[in-house]
Amino acid sequence: MHDHDTTSERLASYADVLAGELPDTWTSSHLPPDAKDDLVELADRIWDLDLVAAALAEHPLQQAAVLSRPDGAQLVLLNRHDERDGFLIAAIAPRALPDEAYRAVPEPNGIALADDPFLSAEQVAGDLLDRYDSALAQVRHNALGGIQPSQPDQVVLTWQPDGSVATAPTDDRAGTVLVAAGFVQDTQSGIYRLSGDDTQAQARALRKIGPQLDQLGIDTALQHHAGRTAPTSAPAAMPPTPAGTRTSVPRSR
């Protein structure tokens, strides 16, 4: 077997074992050297301005293994190009979020791993994943804009300037109810939107979801986006306390 094939097999095998040892459910996939377009797109999304960024500046991405979690979180595993054994691993930034969402959010910079996927899984879980999950939560919250985040026991619905209603539930059960009522989910931001093109249909959907969520032990609350007055046909609810303002600075990734 050629050295190139051996390197690819070693990377893919290591990623498979690592994915199986990480907390929650992770799957791995291998991007070989001939997947040039995918590798270029992946390199642009690597969320690092330190160790991994420096390595990629010296050695552009030739192949990689991508570890994925059902909620959209992704990690990338790379070969090292020095005298040390092991690999590099970094977080992957979500697709389709505006640059503004990343402002004031520190990059969850990647780390170096030893040539032992079992020990490395502990290192990733106790270091990189904690920082990545925190950064993910921040950028997804920033992407909500004027949408008040929901709580496990409450779905907050926000009227939007275009007449739609948006919400970001934290419970998959609530998401199922919303989709059945006509809400459409943006998988990257986690936001569910109900169009306001047909206000009567919208009002029926809003009246429908209240009792269904209540049966699951989930309350509903309605708030108005700044500068908008909700239609009188909407269900009444007390708006939650607005989130605090966020100080933003330009983001680079």
Image (spheres, rainbow, N blue to C red):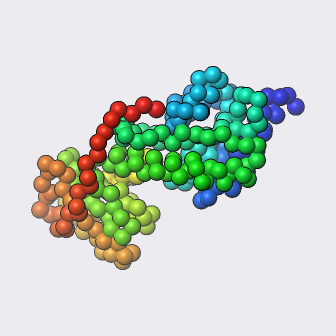
Tell me if residue 186 comes above or below residue 25 in the rendering: above
Tell me if residue 166 comes above or below residue 104 in the rendering: below
Q: Position of residue 9 (x, y in %)?
A: 78, 38
Q: Quadrant of the N terminus?
A: top right
Q: How many marks?
A: 0
Q: At 29% across and 42% down in the image, what residue appears?
A: 247
Q: Quadrant of residue 232?
A: bottom left
Q: Position of residue 143 (x, y in %)?
A: 35, 45
Q: At 62% across and 40% down in the image, what residue appears?
A: 111
Left or right relative to 136: residue 200: left
| In-front residue for pair 192/104 | 104
Q: Position of residue 107 (x, y in %)?
A: 48, 39
For this orientation, the residue located farthest to the right is 1
Report if residue 37 is visible in the image.
no
Left or right relative to 106: residue 1: right
Q: At 36% across and 64% down in the image, what residue appears?
A: 151
| In-front residue for pair 63/241 | 241
| In-front residue for pair 218/114 | 114
Q: At 28% across and 68% down in the image, what residue appears?
A: 220
Report if residue 64 is visible in the image.
yes
Q: Position of residue 119 (x, y in %)?
A: 72, 52
Tell me if residue 193 comes above or below residue 13 in the rendering: below
